Amino acid sequence: MTVEDDVPVGLPVYEKGSRADHHDILTMMINKNHQHKGLGSAAFRELLDDLSVLPQCNRITLNLAEGNERAEAFYRGFGFAPTNEWF
């Protein structure tokens, strides 16, 4: 959960992936009144760090709505790239 001034303002949601060696990030939400402050980036980095140390997490996947260029740029900034794979 992302917190600013002791108030919850965001939430990442993930689950164990359909394959044994990966996890799926389902969504990353930051309250619209708290966006553009770096909170989403900090929360996403923390989520990636947390997932990367799990014993059976060799791959992290996420889904993105086609045409959501802003989200695509955000995820690309963390090294994600489209694969057009569906599991």
Image: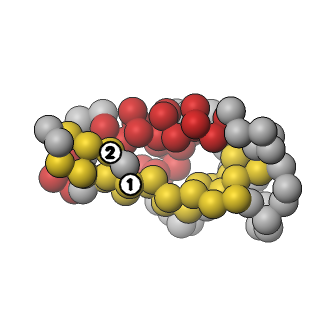
Q: 24 or 1, which lies in front?
A: 1
Query: Given the image, on which type of amino acid does mark 1 rest?
Result: Leu
> What residue is rendered at 24% in x and 51% in y?
8
> Residue 2 has which mark?
2
> What residue is rendered at 77% in x and 50% in y?
22
- Dot 2 falls on a residue whose secondary structure is strand
> What residue is rendered at 68% in x and 33% in y?
53
Q: Is residue 19 above or below residue 46?
A: below
Which image quadrant for residue 86?
A: bottom right
Q: Is residue 50 visible?
A: yes
> Residue 11 has which mark?
1
Which is nearer the N-term, disc 1 or disc 2? 2
Residue 74, percent from left and from top: 47, 42
Give the CA distance from mark 1 to mark 2. 6 Å
Within 10 angstroms of label 2, few (less than 14), some, or many (20 or more) residues?
some
Residue 24, percent from left and from top: 66, 57
Query: Given the image, on which type of amino acid does mark 2 rest?
Result: Thr
Colour scheme of the rendered structure: secondary structure
